[in-house]
Image: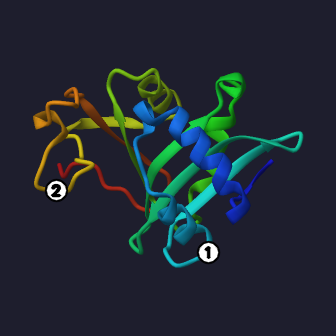
Amino acid sequence: MIRPATLKDITYIEHLRRKNSEAIGFIPKVRYEMEIDGRRGGSILVYENNGDLVGFIYATHNQAGVTHIQQIAIQDDARRLERGTALVEAVVKPIDWLVSCRCAADLESADFWKSIGFNQLDTVAPKSVYGRSKDKACLPTRRARQILRFQKVVGGLWLPEQI
């Protein structure tokens, strides 16, 4: 069952985020709280199986119909059972025409995005955890990673290249 996260779910979300921090990065706890209580316009959904949480997705939405998936994580013992796919489908708003995300090229999940119909657009510079003035690749404690940008058209009018 997929449902909107509640403030009680933040402990689980933080635990799963910490466990998968190398793959999904860091987002402060207060940001999750702000999304859940409605102070921001994003979505945090959790996947519940037999009363136990097994994963979550965090996405932001803009008014132009674009959803950007910030984080998605599924417990190791609950992977490869279509739960990630279900979370991605559930977070897309009815008005959306485009869904996007970023993923490190060295992660197995890069293949996941391709398998559910996302197209790889290009490679982008990693975002800095210290602010916009620094790049992770320049920091001595961080290894440089190739970050892939994916997107999927999910509705609306899409005009490919002009002929």
Q: Is residue 122 visible?
A: yes
Badge 1 is on which residue? 37
How many residues crowd mark 1 within 10 Å: few (<14), some (14–19), many (20+)?
Answer: few
Indicate the secondary structure of the residue bearing disc 1.
loop
Q: Earlier in the sequence, mark 2 or mark 1?
A: 1
Q: Amino acid at mark 1?
A: Asp
In the image, residue 33 lies at what x, y percent?
Answer: 57, 67
Q: Give the residue displayed 68% in from the left and 31% down from the top.
A: 82
Q: Nearer the viewer, residue 1 or 94?
A: 1
Quarter assignment of residue 104: top left
Mark number, residue 132: 2
Estimate the x, y position of residue 103 in percent, counting from the top left.
37, 35
Residue shown at 44% from the left, 29% from the top: 114
Q: Above or below — where is 116 with respect to 30?
A: above
Mark 1 and mark 2 in contact (Cβ < 8 Å)?
no
Residue farthest to the front, as pictured: 141
Q: Residue flagged by tag 2: what amino acid is it?
A: Arg
Foreground of the two, 3 or 89: 3
Residue lying at 16% horizontally and 56% vertically, measured from the top left: 132
- Name the residue located 22 percent from the left edge and 52 percent from the top edge: 130
